[in-house]
Image: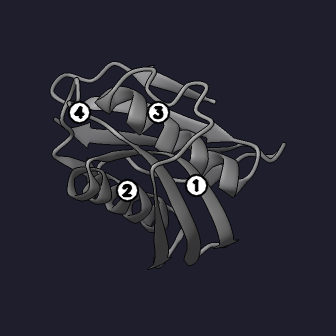
């Protein structure tokens, strides 16, 4: 589950999930909805697959680095990465594959995924959350 947050100069989301994998997948989904709203809905076919392996000092760094890598690959491959399969995802390591669909033109451009306000946390009932700001 994700929600758009009001922010003056950037676009902010609140990514949520009941596992770390769910949090990361939902954050990717919401970033894609900023780039090209609705593009991934109902997707059954993917045009490209990219391997990922990232290390981070904690889950927050790993989340921001994951989204940054997916964003860079979006521009390099001209594909929106709608789905991620995690082979490994823990506090400091992410390994897996991104699956994407080629696009012709984006509705919005994201310049960067920022660390500002990003903070992955888990509450007492197991819900993971993090705000994420995108520099447009």
Q: Are marks 1 and 2 in contact (CB under 8 Å)?
A: yes
Q: x, y (%) of residue 92?
A: 56, 78
First in sequence, mark 4 or 2: give its number.
2
SS for dot 1: strand
Residue 133 seen in the figure: yes
The answer to whether 83 is drawn above or below residue 42 in the figure is below
Answer with the quarter of the image where residue 34 lies. Answer: top left
- Tag shown at residue 84: 1
First in sequence, mark 3 or 1: give its number.
3
Image quadrant containing the C terminus? top left
Q: Are marks 4 and 2 in contact (CB under 8 Å)?
A: no
First in sequence, mark 1 or 4: give its number.
1
Depth-wise, is mark 1 or mark 4 nearer the camera?
4
| Residue in the image at 46% along x and 33% along y | 30
Q: How far separated are the C-alphas under marks 3 and 2?
A: 12 Å
User: Residue beneath label 3, please?
Assistant: 30
Q: Is residue 47 left or right of residue 19?
A: left
User: Residue beneath label 4, please?
Assistant: 104
| Residue in the image at 34% along x and 31% along y | 12
């Amino acid at each position: 589950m994700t929600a758009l947050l009001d922010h003056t100069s950037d676009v902010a989301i609140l990514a949520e999930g009941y596992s770390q994998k769910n949090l990361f997948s939902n954050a990717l989904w919401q970033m894609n909805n900023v780039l090209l709203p609705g593009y991934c809905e109902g997707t059954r076919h993917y045009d490209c697959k990219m391997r990922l392996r990232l290390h981070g000092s904690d889950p927050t760094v790993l989340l921001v680095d994951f989204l940054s890598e997916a964003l860079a690959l979006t521009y390099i491959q001209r594909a929106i990465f709608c789905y991620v399969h995690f082979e490994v995802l823990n506090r400091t390591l992410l390994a897996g594959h991104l699956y994407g669909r080629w696009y012709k033109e984006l509705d919005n451009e994201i310049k960067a995924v920022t660390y500002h306000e990003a903070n992955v946390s888990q509450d007492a009932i197991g819900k993971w959350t993090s705000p994420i700001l995108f520099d447009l």
